[in-house]
Image: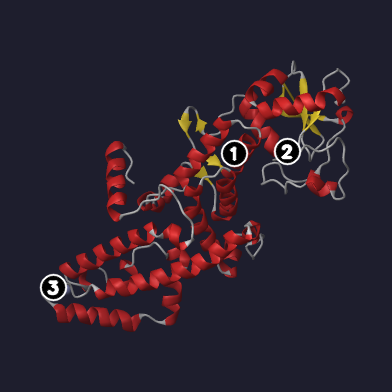
């Protein structure tokens, strides 16, 4: 599953790793990156250094140490217990006799784990109220929980990810609500895919792949506007394994086609069979078709707009363009087709996802039951 590095292996580019900011995502988990500090020259971590602790953990990338209780580590994790037992007979000790154990983890990973285990840090709440957790902490907790078989950490993190990547499209559209669970952005989506695979949680994949499709279709200008000093090309997508990258490419094409097909489907519902002014409404459709030029079509079919209702784009004049019956028929057709596309999302990415909604009825029932049981409108 993983291996521990040996003490004090020198890095060719140690400076680069040592300077890696502690609140940014971790450097690649490569054996080559190990640079454990000597126990005689470690800096005490400002936060996790228990004065009466009896064991010191050394991260792989910085000359820093975390002093904690061995008994608690051994109780929380069978994997840690085995590793401590393996290293203890030959472990170097500090001047005051505490053994130092070399860990394969970064400072950020260890600090996140140990702060939760020893300092009572609850990343999911502020003043006992649920709060958005930053993705870099959630990711570290889930990966460390998985690595050291501390299932509570995995379960809590995955439960929070499921709230940010819901299976119900009404909840998906409520981005403000989703952001109360998780502080993240689309560039983290490839790492969500990695977590989904690591923990065998495929239900996270459609939403995360959708975010990847949006990332893939951001223009260079968009990237520039969002972060003038950052990379223009989307380097995060390169983290994806090749099969997932293929899914993003194929999915992007299918989602674009779906949006175009929905446009035609909605236009075909007008005039409605109950329309009392079919000539007028048919003329409105004709005018809409004439007004669609390549630029507006290109913009409208971009993946970032994939799930948006079509009404505002097709009928810019608003309510008066169509008669009441046609307006209702077009809006209803759009809503139904959108939900069908959502249901189809796993197939779009060629993945099987147990628990994904299988019918429009199921989505509506789920939405109504959640609405009844919550003071929040989904
Ligand atoms: Zn009409």
Relative to 186, residue 275 above or below: below
Label 3, label 1: how far apart the Cα atoms are: 56 Å
Q: Which quarter of the frame holds ligand 1?
A: bottom left
Q: Quadrant of residue 103?
A: top right
Q: Which residue corresponds to mark 3?
A: 275
Residue 225 location, quadrant: bottom right
Q: Is residue 212 visible?
A: yes
Of circles 3 and 1, the one toward us is 1
Spatial separation of the CA atoms under disc 2 and disc 3: 67 Å
Q: Are marks 2 and 1 in contact (CB under 8 Å)?
A: no
What's the mark number on residue 105? 2
Q: Please provide percent x and percent y for residue 275.
A: 13, 73
Q: Is residue 99 left or right of residue 185?
A: right
The answer to whether 350 is drawn above or below residue 105 in the figure is below
SS assignment at label 2: loop
Mark 3 Cβ and ligand 1 under 8 Å apart:
yes
Q: Residue furthest top?
A: 52
Is residue 315 visible to the viewer in this orientation of the structure? no
């Amino acid at each position: 599953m993983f291996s521990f590095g040996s003490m004090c292996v020198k890095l060719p580019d140690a400076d680069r790793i040592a300077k890696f900011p502690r609140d940014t995502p971790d450097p690649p988990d490569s054996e080559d990156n190990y640079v454990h500090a000597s126990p005689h020259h470690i800096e005490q971590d400002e936060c996790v250094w228990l004065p009466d602790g009896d064991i010191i953990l050394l991260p792989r990338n910085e000359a820093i140490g975390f002093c904690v209780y061995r008994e608690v580590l051994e109780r929380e994790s069978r994997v840690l217990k085995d590793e401590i037992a393996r290293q203890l007979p030959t472990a170097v000790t500090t001047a005051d006799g505490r053994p130092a154990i070399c860990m394969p983890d970064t400072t950020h990973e260890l600090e996140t784990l140990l702060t939760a285990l020893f300092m009572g840090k609850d990343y999911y709440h502020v003043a006992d109220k649920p709060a958005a957790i930053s993705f870099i902490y959630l990711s570290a907790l889930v990966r460390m929980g998985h690595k050291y078989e501390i299932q509570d950490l995995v379960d809590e993190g995955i439960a929070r990810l499921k709230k940010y990547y819901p299976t119900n499209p009404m909840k998906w559209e409520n981005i403000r609500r989703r952001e109360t669970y998780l502080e993240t952005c689309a560039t983290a989506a490839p790492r969500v895919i990695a977590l989904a695979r690591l923990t065998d949680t495929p239900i996270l994949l459609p939403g995360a792949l959708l975010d990847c499709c949006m990332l893939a279709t951001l223009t260079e200008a968009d990237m520039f506007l969002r972060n003038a000093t950052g990379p223009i090309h989307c380097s995060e997508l390169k983290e994806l394994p090749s099969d997932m990258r293929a899914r993003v490419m194929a999915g992007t094409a299918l989602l674009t086609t779906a949006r175009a097909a929905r446009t035609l489907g909605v236009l075909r519902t007008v005039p409605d069979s109950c329309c009392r002014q079919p000539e007028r409404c048919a003329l409105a459709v004709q005018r809409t078709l004439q007004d669609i030029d390549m630029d507006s079509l290109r913009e409208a079919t971009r993946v970032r707009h994939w799930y948006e209702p079509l009404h505002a784009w097709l009928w810019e004049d608003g309510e008066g363009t169509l008669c009441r019956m046609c307006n209702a028929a077009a809006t209803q057709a759009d809503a139904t087709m959108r939900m069908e596309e959502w249901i189809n999302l796993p197939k779009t990415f060629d993945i099987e996802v147990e628990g994904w909604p299988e019918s429009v009825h199921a989505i509506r029932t789920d939405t109504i039951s959640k609405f009844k049981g919550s003071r929040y409108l989904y």
